[in-house]
Amino acid sequence: QVHLVESGGGLVQAGGSLRLSCTASGNTICISHMGWYRQAPGKERELVAVVLRGGSTTYADSFKGRFTISRDNANNMLYLQMMSLKHEDTAVYYCHAHSGGRLGCRNDYWGQGTEVTVSS
């Protein structure tokens, strides 16, 4: 199966930037589109952005203009560049991969999450 590991989280001041990374390993042929989700304390997990294998991107409205998602298919990497961070961006950020319904693959794969704390 697919194993996803996030990195790059940490403590940052409001207005600062962070770049999250996600490394995919295992049966990466199962990966079609990838995305970032986040879960703030006391809230439900929400979509941040998705990138298709070909590079097309979609963002939830709240993150347009501040966050940039990208992927490196050759190296099985996913990134999230976050800028102008706000205290409200404090959350655990999760890497997600979807198989697109490929036979022999699970639909969804999740990483363990990386914590981002934005101090106000």
Image: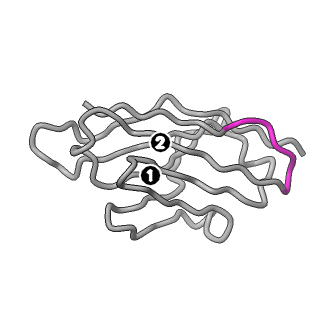
* Residue at far left of view: 103
Q: Tell me which residue sits at (54%, 55%) in the image.
A: 48
Element carrying mark 2 = strand
Near mark 1 (Cα within 10 A), the count class, few <14, some 14-19 or many ≥20, is many
Residue 75 in the figure: left or right of residue 80: left
Q: Position of residue 103 (x, y in %)?
A: 9, 43
Marked residue nearer the N-terminal end (2 or 1): 1
* Residue at far right of view: 120
Cα distance in 3D space between marks 2 and 1: 6 Å
Task: Choose top left, top right, bottom left or bottom right for residue 29.
Answer: top left
| Quarter that holds the C terminus | top right
Compared to 72, does 20 lie above or below?
Answer: above
Q: Tell me which residue sits at (22%, 43%) in the image.
A: 30
| Residue that badge 2 annotates | 95
- Front residue (pair 4, 15): 4
Compared to 83, does 42 lie above or below?
Answer: above
Q: Position of residue 12 (x, y in %)?
A: 82, 43
* Residue at far front of view: 74
Q: Are the residues flagged by discs 2 and 1 in contact, CB closer than 8 Å?
A: yes
Task: Choose top left, top right, bottom left or bottom right for residue 104.
Answer: top left
- Mark on residue 35? 1
| Quarter that holds the N terminus | top left
Residue 66 in the figure: left or right of residue 96: right
Near mark 2 (Cα within 10 A), the count class, few <14, some 14-19 or many ≥20, is many
- Front residue (pair 59, 27): 27
Q: Does the magenta stretch include residue 35?
A: no
Which residues lie in the magenta part? 9-15
Element carrying mark 1 = strand
Compared to 6, does 21 lie above or below?
Answer: below
